[in-house]
Amino acid sequence: MRQEMTLDEKESESLLAYKDQLNKEWLYILDYWAFHVVDTAHGGFYGSVNNENVPDTNAPKGIVMNSRILWAFSSSYNRLQNKTYLEIANRAFNYIINYFIDDAYGAVYWSVDKDGVMVDGRKKVYGLAFCIYGMSEYYKATKNEDALRFCKKIFEYIELYSFDKEHGGYIGAFSRDWKMEDDLRLSEKDYNAKKTMNTQLHLAEAYSNLYSVWPDEEVKQKIEGLLENFDKHLINKRSFHLNLFMDEQWNPLSSLISFGHDIEASWLLLQCATTVQSHHYMELFKNYAVEIGYAAAGGLDKDGGLWFESEPLNDLPAKEKHSWAQAEAMIGFLNIYQLTGSKQYLQYSLNSWQFVKDHIIDKEKGGWFWGVNADNTILTNKDKAGFWKCPYHTTRACMEIIDRINSILATQ
């Protein structure tokens, strides 16, 4: 389905400017995190940094944040060979190895305190997925066999305890000693569901990155199984939004729409299918990329920003635009342009970037704000860096778009 395109002068200029700006923004993001988030007193990285760039030195440190830092700086080093980025990646790797590993029950803790002492030992599969994602990227950068062994071991734990042998898919959370718990929520805002779209999506992403360094047949089969579950259970075939929260039998528990997750999944699932060269799923998810992306475009505001989410059954209006969703919109809409040649979707991607420049990037103090309210005032009660706010969506958007523009221009 990927469209062969002949660019006019305006499109070529827009793409070249887009690429140039994101090359610069990528470095600004990395510099911000290297300068403001490194915890020189206690090791690793601060658990929270506010909009004034003031760290909360007592904030807990999460496995998701540390794994995403590991991925962002490893991936950036793999492309740019900047030794500073490798130093930050080494710092993240060593902190995870020294403080997050659960020697008693295996895998990693969900969070530790400022001194690296366990705060929450629960096994949340979303966090384990990001460990694999970060460690496999670090292995690409360093060929450190400990990192690859770590990935393989986490993969074994997930398949042993989380994989649902009866219904397929993965249960989202367990106690520290791998017992089923009553509270399975990833965060306080989530529904208490045994299976979530978010966990399945980022397991597919993590397993795909693992497969790129360890092309094991079982890993490929597990990725294809995750793609099959998206096809059968997670993509609403009427609306082409994603079902976000399910019970064990895949019955939806919520009508909530997450426009950010829709547009993220639209391109990421196709990328997973492409990584394992599964031609059936490549063709299937090219079509889904367009359908889901079209549905996600319903969350665009007139200013180019993408609303975070909406609850149609309860008629709750969208109230916020989060930074990560704008980053995913930049990639996802450009992907639809690549697949269809539709200039409208190129413009949507460019508009998303313009919205980021206008409202999300902190032009005075650096970094990206968490997001904005409906009137585009900054969300003041959110971190600029923290448990969930990491250099993952942002650096990934820069790298993906640079690569995609290079690919488009190379065909001309």
Image (cartoon, rainbow, N blue to C red):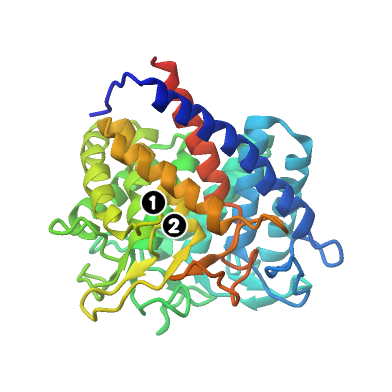
Find residue 130 and report its horizontal and vertical position in percent: 53, 55
Find residue 278 and report its horizontal and vertical position in percent: 29, 34
Please indicate whether residue 372 sits to the left or right of residue 204 in the image: right
Residue beneath label 1, please? 264
Mark number, residue 325: 2
Give the image quarter of residue 131. Answer: bottom right
At numbered mark 1, what does the secondary structure look like: helix, strand or loop? Answer: helix
Distance Cα–Cα, label 1 vs label 2: 8 Å
Question: What residue appears at the point 70 percent right and 51 percent down from the top-left corner?
Answer: 93
| Front residue of 118 and 51 | 51
Find residue 338 and report its horizontal and vertical position in percent: 33, 31
Contact check, label 1 and label 2, Cβ < 8 Å: yes
Residue most toward the right? 41
Asked if 284 appears above or below 94 in the picture, the reply is: above
Amino acid, disc 2:
Ala
| Front residue of 1 and 329 | 329
Asked if 408 appears above or below 147 in the picture, the reply is: above
Q: Residues within 10 Å of mark 1 (few under 14, many from 20)?
A: many
| Front residue of 319 and 387 | 319
Residue most toward the bottom? 182
| Front residue of 30 and 225 | 30
Amino acid, disc 1:
Glu
